[in-house]
Image (cartoon, rainbow, N blue to C red):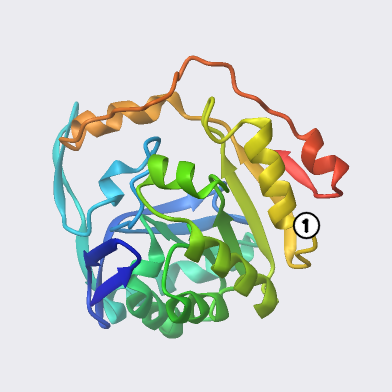
């Protein structure tokens, strides 16, 4: 299915099959409890700090690491992926967990993800998204989820386009839609030194989130300096236009003063 949003066009999977670049079991940072996280391949954003570069392309690709070569990207039918996940659900429920759909960007394969969720046994479902996607696709996956992790990077549209390659208009629209739907959500902010961690950007995020009743909290995610090495293994070039060694600004007071619960994840 071809998804066209703004200036970005990617050709991804059809309704009954999709491409996954990783499935991680027993994760504890991708939502409440013990979880299994499915990483969908393909993302319309090209964030300079992306820590999953192998998730950007929709197509399978060779990853050459110290342990040899592997293929990042495997195609599943919706029935096949659900059959793989359903036997884990009893264990996940017993540990107050569930299934998380992350990426890449799940919205690029929304029909596939929706079909997988519909085939799952009763389980807590979390959607981890950048919010960059068609409104219909966004609503479809939000309606099928129990909790949403929604990434906010930069509020200034010019800076957002420069550092991610995409406009943020649809992201902000989907954030408002998410709140109107009434689904509980957590906003996650990746802290990039001198880019997303500035008081100016954090204050803009605070103003954007004021009055959103579905917001549970904001998670500030410290910058991962190890991410750059993954680009070489994926045959990609890592070109950050910021100083990785710069000390992060971990200013939680802007959120606290606005009455917004915040944590450093």
Q: Is residue 265 visible?
A: no
On the image, the x and y values in percent for residue 122 come to 55, 80
In the image, 237: left or right of 117? left
Residue at image position (53%, 16%) is 246
When the figure is inspected, residue 144 is found, relative to residue 20, above or below; the finding is below
Front residue of 210/38: it is 210
Query: x, y percentage for residue 170?
Result: 48, 65
Q: Is residue 229 visible?
A: yes
Quarter of the picture containing the C terminus is top right
Dot 1 corresponds to which residue? 210
Instruction: Specify whether 78 is left or right of 152.
Output: left
Q: What residue is rendered at 59% in x and 44% in y?
A: 189
Give percent across and percent down for residue 251: 73, 30
Please identify the quadrant where the N terminus is shown: bottom left
Depth check, front residue: 249 or 4: 4
Residue drawn at x 59%, y 55% is 31
x, y (%) of residue 42? 28, 58
Residue farthest along the front direction in this orientation: 158
């Amino acid at each position: 299915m071809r998804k066209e949003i703004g200036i970005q066009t990617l050709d991804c999977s059809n309704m009954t099959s999709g491409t996954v670049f990783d499935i991680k079991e027993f994760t504890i940072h991708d939502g409440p409890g013990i979880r299994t996280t499915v990483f969908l391949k393909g993302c319309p954003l090209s964030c300079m700090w992306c820590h999953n570069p192998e998730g950007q392309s929709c197509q399978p690709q060779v990853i050459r690491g110290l342990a040899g070569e592997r293929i990042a990207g495997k195609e599943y039918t919706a029935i096949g992926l659900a059959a793989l996940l359903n036997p884990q659900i009893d264990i996940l429920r017993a540990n107050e967990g569930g299934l998380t759909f992350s990426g890449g960007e799940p919205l690029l394969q929304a029909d596939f993800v929706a079909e997988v969720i519909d085939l799952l046994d009763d389980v807590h479902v979390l959607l981890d998204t950048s919010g960059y996607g068609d409104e219909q696709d966004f609503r479809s996956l939000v309606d099928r989820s129990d909790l949403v992790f929604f990434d906010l990077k930069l509020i200034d549209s010019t800076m957002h386009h420069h550092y991610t390659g995409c406009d943020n208009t649809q992201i902000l629209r989907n954030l408002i839609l998410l709140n109107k739907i009434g689904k509980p959500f957590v906003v996650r902010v990746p802290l990039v030194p001198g880019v997303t961690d500035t008081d100016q950007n954090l204050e803009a995020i605070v103003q954007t989130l004021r009055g959103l009743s579905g917001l549970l909290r904001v998670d500030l995610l410290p910058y991962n300096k190890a991410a750059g090495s993954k680009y070489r293994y994926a045959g990609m070039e890592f070109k950050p236009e910021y100083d990785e060694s710069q000390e992060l600004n971990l200013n939680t007071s802007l959120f606290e003063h606005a009455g917004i619960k915040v944590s450093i994840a």
